[in-house]
Image: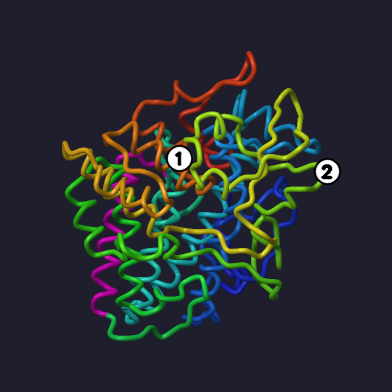
C-alpha cells in the first residue's frame, strides 16, 4: 500500500465503505489541510463504530458465544469455525483496516493540535483502545504500531503492542489530568457523563484496567480501577457506548447512516445472529442474565449444520447503543485482578450476582469468575479473549467434526511484503 498524502481528514467521517466484503481504502494518515479539532474528534468517534458489529460477530463466533448464520456468505460458519482464516479476505482485513483508519486520525489530532492537551489525551486513549482491538484478534501474530505506514511498517510482537497500549493510555491519562475543566470539542451522547477531561480520564483508566488484566499486571489493574468509574453501588450499565443515528456521516457496520449491525427482530422467520446453544445449557436455573439477553424461539434456526433457538434480545432496534465498557465489567475485572493476586474475587462476584437477584456464590476463583463474565457480558466481545487468556480454548464446544477454535487471526495479506 502507498501513503495517501492529500486526502481531507473529513473523509474519515464521510467516506462510505459499502458492504463488509468490499476492500477498504488505504488506512494511512491523510493530510491536515482543513482539519479542526472537532472534525478530527468527530471522525475518530465515528470511525470507532465502523466494523464494530463485524468485530463482535467474529469474536463471538470464534469464541462459541454465537453463530452468525448468513446463507449469502458461508464464510461466517465455514472460515470462522473451520478455517483456514483467509489473510486476504474481508473477515481478516476489514476489522484491521477500520481500526487503523481511526489510529491514523488520532495521530493527526496529536501532531496537529499538540498544544491542546485535552485533544491529545482523547487521541491517545482512543488510539490505545483501537490497538487493543487489533491485538485482541491477531494475538500472538502482533500488530503494527503507529506511525503507521502500511508495508513500510513492521509488525511488532504481541508483548510490544501491549507495552505500547499501556504507554499510550498512561500518557493520555497524564494529558487529561492537565487539560482543565472542559474539552475544546464536543463528544456524542455515547460519552454522556464522560465528556470532560476529568470524567474521560475515568474512561481511560477503565480501559487501562482491562489492558492490565490481559497483561496479568494485577496491581496496576487494581490501581486503575480505583481511578476509573467503577462503583459497585452504581448502575451496572453505567459506561461509555457506541451510539448510532441516521445522521450523515454516522458510520455503522457497513457505511454511512447504518445502525448497530447487531439487532434483528427475534421473531423474524430467519435470524442471522443466534446465541450458541450452550449459553442455555450452561446457565444457572433462573439466571435473569440468560432470560434478559436471549429469547427461546418456538422455531429453531438452522444453517450449515448449526442449529439454535436462542435469539438475542439485548437490542430493540437498529440504533440501540452498544457498550464500549461499562461498570459491570469493571466490577468483574476487580474480581479477576484479586484472583490473580491470590484471592477468590468473591466479594465482587457476589456484588454482581446480587444485582441480578442471584444467591451468593459460595466460592470464587477463576472458574466462577469466567462463568459470571460469560453471562454478564454476553456478546460484548470478551468470551474468546478470556478463554484464550487462561488457556481454556479447548473447553469451548465444537459442533461439527471439522470445526476448530483459532487462537490468532493472521496479519492481513495486504500488510505483508510479498503478501
Report the Cα–Cα distance between label 2 and label 1: 28 Å
Q: x%, y% of residue 271? A: 75, 43
* Residue designated by label 1: 374
In the image: residue 404, left or right of residue 336: right
97 relative position to 301: left or right: left
Looking at the image, which residue sits at the far top? 401
Please tell me whether the stretch drawn in magenta is mainly helix, strand or loop: helix
Q: Quadrant of residue 83?
A: top right
Residue beneath disc 2? 269
Q: Please report the residue visible at 39 percent of the width from the left and 51 percent of the height from the top.
A: 145
Q: Which mark is residue 87?
A: none
**Of the pair 369 and 239, the residue shown nearer to us:** 369
Residue at the (30%, 63%) spot, across then down: 231
| Vertical arrangement, residue 168 with respect to residue 160, above or below | below
Q: Is residue 195 left or right of residue 314?
A: left
What are the residue bounds of the magenta stretch? 154-178
Q: Position of residue 286 (x, y in %)?
A: 50, 41
Helix or strand or loop: what does disc 1 sit on?
helix
Amino acid at each position: 500500500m502507498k501513503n495517501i498524502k492529500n486526502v481531507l481528514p473529513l473523509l474519515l467521517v464521510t467516506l462510505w465503505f459499502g458492504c463488509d466484503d468490499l476492500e477498504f481504502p488505504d488506512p494511512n494518515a491523510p493530510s491536515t489541510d482543513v482539519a479542526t479539532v472537532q472534525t478530527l474528534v468527530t471522525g475518530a468517534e465515528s470511525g470507532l463504530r465502523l466494523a464494530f458489529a463485524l468485530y463482535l460477530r467474529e469474536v463471538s463466533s470464534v469464541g462459541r458465544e454465537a453463530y452468525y448464520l448468513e446463507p449469502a456468505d458461508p464464510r461466517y460458519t465455514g472460515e470462522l469455525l473451520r478455517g483456514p482464516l483467509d489473510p486476504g479476505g474481508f473477515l481478516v482485513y476489514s476489522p484491521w483496516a477500520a481500526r487503523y483508519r481511526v489510529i491514523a486520525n488520532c495521530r493527526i489530532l496529536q501532531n496537529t493540535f499538540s498544544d491542546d492537551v485535552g485533544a491529545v489525551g482523547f487521541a491517545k486513549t482512543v488510539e490505545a483502545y483501537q490497538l487493543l482491538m487489533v491485538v485482541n484478534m491477531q494475538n500472538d501474530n502482533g500488530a503494527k504500531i503507529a506511525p503507521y505506514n502500511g508495508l513500510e511498517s513492521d509488525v511488532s510482537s504481541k508483548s510490544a503492542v501491549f507495552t505500547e497500549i499501556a504507554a499510550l493510555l498512561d500518557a493520555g491519562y497524564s494529558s487529561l489530568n492537565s487539560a482543565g475543566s472542559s474539552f475544546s470539542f464536543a463528544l456524542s451522547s455515547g460519552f454522556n457523563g464522560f465528556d470532560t477531561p476529568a470524567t474521560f480520564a475515568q474512561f481511560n483508566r477503565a480501559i487501562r484496567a482491562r489492558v492490565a488484566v490481559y497483561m496479568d499486571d494485577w496491581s496496576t489493574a487494581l490501581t486503575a480501577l480505583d481511578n476509573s468509574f467503577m462503583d459497585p453501588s452504581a448502575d451496572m450499565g453505567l459506561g461509555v457506548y457506541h451510539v448510532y443515528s441516521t445522521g450523515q456521516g454516522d458510520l455503522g457496520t457497513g457505511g454511512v447512516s447504518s445502525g448497530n449491525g447487531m439487532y434483528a427482530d427475534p421473531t423474524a422467520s430467519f435470524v442471522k445472529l443466534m446465541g450458541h446453544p450452550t449459553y442455555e445449557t450452561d446457565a444457572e436455573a433462573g439466571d435473569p442474565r440468560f432470560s434478559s439477553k436471549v429469547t427461546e424461539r418456538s422455531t429453531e434456526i438452522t444453517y450449515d449444520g448449526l442449529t439454535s433457538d436462542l435469539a438475542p434480545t439485548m437490542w430493540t432496534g437498529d440504533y440501540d447503543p452498544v457498550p464500549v465498557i461499562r461498570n459491570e465489567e469493571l466490577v468483574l475485572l476487580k474480581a479477576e485482578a484479586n484472583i490473580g493476586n491470590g484471592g477468590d474475587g468473591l466479594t465482587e462476584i457476589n456484588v454482581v450476582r446480587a444485582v441480578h437477584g442471584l444467591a451468593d456464590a459460595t466460592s470464587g476463583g477463576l472458574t466462577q469468575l469466567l462463568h459470571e463474565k460469560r453471562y454478564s457480558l454476553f456478546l460484548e466481545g470478551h468470551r474468546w479473549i478470556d478463554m484464550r487468556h487462561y488457556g481454556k480454548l479447548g473447553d469451548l464446544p465444537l459442533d461439527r467434526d471439522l470445526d476448530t477454535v483459532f487462537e490468532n487471526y493472521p496479519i492481513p495479506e495486504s500488510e505483508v511484503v510479498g503478501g
